Image (cartoon, rainbow, N blue to C red):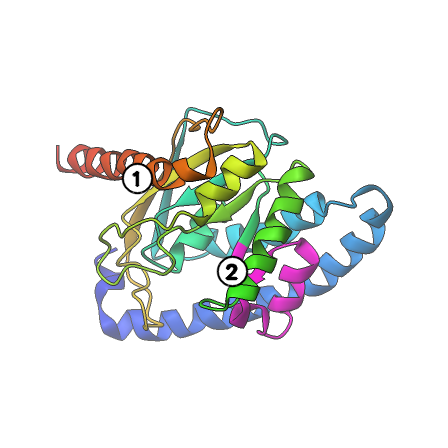
Amino acid sequence: MLVLRSRWIAAPLSALLWASYVAIVILWTPLVLLFRLLTFPWDPDRYRVGRVFHSSAAFAARINPFWVFRIVDHVRPDDRRPYVLVANHSSFTDVFLIASLPWEMKFLSKKSIFQIPLLGWQMTVAGDVPIVRGDRESVREAMRELRRRLDRRLSVLFFPEGTRSQDGSLGEFREGAFRLAIEAGVDVLPLAIVGAAGSLPKHSFLFHPATATLVVLAPESTAGLSAADAPRLAERVRERIRETIRAVHEERRS
């Protein structure tokens, strides 16, 4: 890790890793296509093809020498029970960390990511959902698509802060994810991510050594709640994530 902190090592190695990530996207494209063709009749929800696609991000994480991932999951949620998963967001690394979880979920992602050649096509085939930030019609359509996935017993993932934190601090949670969970009658599954903020800083392509921890928290029930309760639910889940982040930091210092 000390060697990787040297810019003379980190810069060329980061370039090599990005090149390898491009190669992974290219190599995964025919695999995703073939898997979709073979499973089309009995995988209408794109559960299995989504798992194949998202495994590429997990593989990319494993070959990155800068990253050490730790997943703490004492909950072990039912893989085919739908949840609205919500996670704090401080780095692009978060996506790779969440993709390393052993169950399938559909990501809500900026439409611009879907426009990346090959990668965007794979995301579409996998059933991930695009959104244009600030476009009300796009937001409404994305919510409709996410609701359809929940109704088909597929979990969906939100970063309720809306964007990555600049300094790793926990921002305010928007209520959209929580309103969707209440309306769909599914539980919210919080994910607390600690230590990823400095691994790939915002507006930087240079990897940095980091040990990132993802903690799966117990589900938060939406039973008996109405849409008016969404802000309070959002704040309750945010507080649980904040407390978990604090506890992990204290554990590392001890």
Work out which residue is located at the far right of the displayed protein and give it.
41
Residue 102 visible (yes or no): no
Q: Which residue is at 45% across, 34% downward?
A: 189
Quadrant containing the C terminus in the rendered view: top left
Decide: is 139 above or below 41: below
State the count of labels: 2
**SS under mark 1:** helix
Residue 246 location, x and y as percent?
Answer: 20, 37
User: Is 193 left, or right, of 146 in this rendering?
Assistant: left
Earlier along the polypeptide chain: callout 1 or callout 2? 2
In the image, is residue 128 part of the stretch drawn in magenta? yes
Residue 195 location, x and y as percent?
Answer: 27, 48
Residue 104 location, x and y as percent?
Answer: 59, 42
In the image, is residue 216 part of the stretch drawn in magenta? no
For this rendering, which residue is in front, 40 or 176? 176
The residues bearing labels 1 and 2 have C-alpha atoms spaced at a distance of: 23 Å
Q: What residue sits right under mark 1 in the picture?
A: 235
For this rendering, which residue is in front, 71 or 243? 243
Residue 33 placement: quadrant: bottom right
Decide: is 44 above or below 93: above
Question: For the magenta stretch, what is the residue range?
Answer: 108-130
Q: Identify residue type, mark 2.
A: Ser
For this rendering, which residue is in front, 221 or 80? 221
The 10 Å Cα crowd at callout 1, few under 14, some 14 to 19, many 20 or more, is: some
Mark in front: 1 vs 2: 1
Q: Which residue is at 32% across, 74% downward?
A: 11
Quadrant containing the N terminus in the rendered view: bottom left
Residue 221 location, x and y as percent?
Answer: 45, 26
Q: Which residue is at 47% across, 41% downward?
A: 85
Which mark is drawn over residue 109? 2
